Amino acid sequence: MTDFVLVRHGETEWHAENRYAGRTDVPLTGLGRRQAAALGVWAAGQRLDAVLCSPLSRAGLTAQPAATALGLSPRVDERLYEVDFGRGDGLTRREMAAEFPAELAAFLDDPVAHHLPGGEDPVAAAARGVDCLRDVARDLPDGRVLVVAHSTLVRLVLCELLGIPLSHYRQVFPALENGALTELRLSGGRASLLRLNVPLTPGLD
């Protein structure tokens, strides 16, 4: 079996403003940097065999303190990119409602059948994320791996592996907090959710 500790990167400037951050490379806030440092402190006391992260800098900067504490180099995997939100990238919900109200309403009703205009198909995003984890599980069949990625991608991957309809990801997993831990076990082709959205540093902000 392989255990994965899935972490949403630290807070970014856009998340502090409730803007959708997809493929745009948005810097961490001061809080986001403190969340990354807290992850490093946590990792120093753990047995972890590898650290993976998305190519976006907000994930890499969050992963680096943990990798340094473990004496490892983060492995960057393009399959861990956040979902591309197309025309919604960089906008708040209110701004989207002003620019494309019908498309936003359809997305909120079913975010998989009606993903944001110009954005990535969530089915394809889930598939690439699951492929990444399954490849790592094959390489490290008894390992424990830290994966620093993104909220929507992680929620889609959880749904895909746990047999939950992808269109329900917003209801079943309404939020993953920045820097919080979600632990998933892959064993014999099956997935088990061990922990969900556990904060490392209550009261940090």
Image: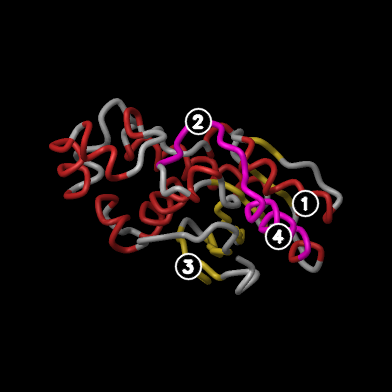
Which residue is rendered at x = 55% and y = 57% of the image?
178
Provide residue 167's location: percent of width, then percent of height. Answer: 25, 50
Provide residue 200's location: percent of width, then percent of height. Answer: 64, 69
Calculate the distance from the C-alpha at mark 4 to the C-alpha at mark 2.
Answer: 23 Å
Q: Nearer the viewer, mark 1 or mark 2?
A: 2
Residue 127's quadrant in the figure? top left
Query: Would residue 25 be found to the left or right of residue 100 on screen?
Result: right
| Disc assigned to residue 24 | 2
Q: Nearer the viewer, mark 4 or mark 2?
A: 2
| Disc assigned to residue 110 | none
Label 1: element kind: helix
Provide residue 107's location: percent of width, then percent of height. Answer: 21, 43
- Label 4 packing within 10 angstroms: few (<14), some (14-19), many (20+): many
Q: Which kind of residue does numbered mark 3 sit on?
A: Leu
Q: What residue would you read off at disc 4?
A: 39
Instruction: Check if mark 4's residue and mark 2's residue have beta carbons within 8 Å.
Output: no
The total number of labels drawn is 4
Q: Which residues are magenta?
A: 20-41
Calculate the distance from the C-alpha at mark 1 to the C-alpha at mark 3.
Answer: 25 Å
| Disc assigned to residue 193 | 3
- Label 1 packing within 10 angstroms: few (<14), some (14-19), many (20+): many
